Image (cartoon, rainbow, N blue to C red):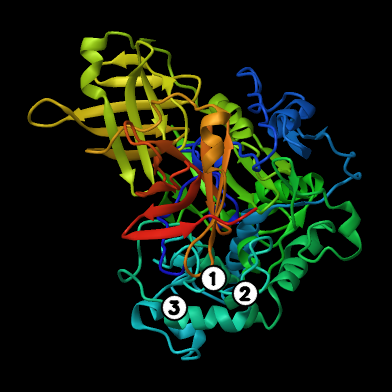
Amino acid sequence: MESFVWAHRVAWHALAAGLVSAALAGHAGAQAQQPAGTATAPAAPVLPRSFDWSGPADTLAAAALGLLRGAAEVGVWHGGQARFGAAHNRVAEAPAQALFEVGSISKVFTGLLLAQAVERGDLALDDTLGGLLNGSPALPAPVAAITLRQLVTHTSCLPRLPADFRRDSDAANPYLRYDRARLWQALADARLAQSPPCAGAYSNLGFAVLGELLAQRHGKPWAELVQERITGPLGMHDTVQSLGDKAPRLAVPHEGEMPVSVWDFDAFSGAGALRSTAADMLVFSRALLAGAQGPLGPAAERLFTPLADHDGGQIGYAIMLRERDGLRTWLHGGGTGGFRSVWLLAPDRGEAVIALVANAQAAQQDVMTPLLAQRYPVPPGQPATDAAALAPYEGVYRASPAVALSLALVDGQLQLRPTGGVFEPLQVLGTDAFTQPTSGRQLRFERDKEGRPAVLRYTRFGARLTALRVKEPVLGLAPPQSDEVLAPYLGRYRLRGGTVMDVQATSGRLQVRLGSQPRYTVYPLPGQRDRFAYDAVRAELEFERYSSGEVRAVVLHQNGHFRAPRLEP
């Protein structure tokens, strides 16, 4: 329903929030999901911690895909040479030079188009929507004041998606029917919570607007601009929006065990429309790494200019920056209904990695974590097992409405669980300081006047977050539940207005997807039968049963109560 608003998420999501967040890698969309009625797939294997940028590309591809159905391909540029690897599970081998949807990595191409325009003097970062659109459509004053800088850095205050996005949309191909007329109307109808700029909040709407502004400015569709100014000059002939005769080479998209639809775009092209290959993405990577002296000229260097803070790090022209001790890693991720992608650049070493996976349940951190852990190692500590000394740290520390860190004594050790993740042991590094070498996390606490831990400073791979202690229940302490316990809840429920809530089970946890949004884990609330809570948003689900015990409906508790009757199979 249109009034139901999810908080912004920083996760490994589909295009709906398609960045790679190194600050809290391993939560929310990183979890595997499985369609109802199918066998539960084992968890994807994690790369050996010794893996590095020079390791076998086939190993990286296998880890990216794990045990999921589908195909994965990886390209690595290391030591002046390109290496490629592939993996396939329970599908026919993908064709040579298979294409994959790269989702939100498309935003970097939009960012580069803007960088080129700024470099030429055609546009300026401080140009406003009101000035560029010249009154057509008429915009509310705060919307008219949005600048190109704010669009390209997700600081525009625009929501993730327009309010009418789900109207007449197809969950299997949700962006297809959203055209330019609707986009401009959504912009005219937008009501911002405050005047820009805002703290970074990922916005596909913002990049749709930016892509269409560039197209309007130059009198050509976004895809034609990309071909004319980026992919054509670089010889990236397999990086396209429309597949045309390349359609047979597209890897089959999956979500878990299920083949799913490709995603097509109209007005949202600049936010996520491209398909590409590992080989083409390495060509693009090398052109960017070459900087101003490379084939893209000064715009390549401009692309990497930090413009704003975002997700604990910084952001340039759409591309995310992680930095520690002067060592920079640039990155972006992407996803659509049946694909996931991860892209990292190490400019100090002239290296790049691109991982493309034809399954929306792929855990992108299985690629990213070992590579970033190698670049940003953390020191080991001592086991955190002194219960009396560690008990004061237990609780929930919230960095944003969508991001929380839970600490609890589990199996005799102080353990940490980020939003949507699992509890993992911490080690003591010093007074009020902890480390988690396997994940790259470091924590430092500040105490209040009463001497209680109250503020958590969190760092990971060059990203930094500050979280405040809040009075919320610690979720995820209950062990995973059996298939028999979860089976009554599984199915589809329809909210008033037509939006469908799909409830599935994976690895002993309920996974819930609302409409075309990503899936989220919900956790049982202690002592409350049939009641579950999200930690990615402040919301709960309460299932209703008939007297016979069969589940008949679910009630969503978030800014009110929204009942969704169960749909018959």
Residue at the (42%, 54%) spot, across then down? 8
Using a 10 Å C-alpha cutoff, classify the residue at mark 3 as few (fewer than 14 neighbours), some (14 to 19) or many (20 or more).
some
Which numbered tag is attached to residue 503?
Answer: none
Q: Disc 3 on helix, strand or loop? A: loop
Marked residue nearer the N-terminal end (3 or 1): 3
Frontmost of labels 3 and 1 is: 1
> How far is disc 3 from disc 1 in space, using C-alphas?
24 Å
Which numbered tag is attached to residue 128?
Answer: 3
Q: Nearer the viewer, residue 306 or 269?
A: 269
**Three-letter code for the amino acid on which mark 2 is drawn:** Tyr
Q: Is residue 65 above or below residue 134?
A: above
Q: Nearer the viewer, residue 565 or 408?
A: 565
**Three-letter code for the amino acid on which mark 3 is drawn:** Thr
Are the residues tagged 2 and 1 within 8 Å (C-beta)?
Answer: yes
Q: Is residue 132 above or below residue 204?
A: below
Q: Which residue is mark 2?
A: 178
Are the residues tagged 3 and 1 within 8 Å (C-beta)?
Answer: no
Q: Residue furthest front?
A: 548
Horizontal side, residue 206 vs residue 407: left or right: right
> How far is disc 3 from disc 2 in space, using C-alphas?
23 Å
Marked residue nearer the N-terminal end (2 or 1): 1
Q: Nearer the viewer, residue 431 or 569?
A: 569
Using a 10 Å C-alpha cutoff, classify the residue at mark 2 as few (fewer than 14 neighbours), some (14 to 19) or many (20 or more).
some
Which numbered tag is attached to residue 165?
Answer: 1
Are the residues tagged 3 and 2 within 8 Å (C-beta)?
Answer: no
Marked residue nearer the N-terminal end (3 or 2): 3
Q: Is residue 325 above or below residue 137?
A: above
Residue 479 % position (x, y): 45, 23
**Three-letter code for the amino acid on which mark 1 is drawn:** Phe
Residue at the (50%, 66%) spot, across then down? 161
Determine if residue 1 is in view.
Answer: yes
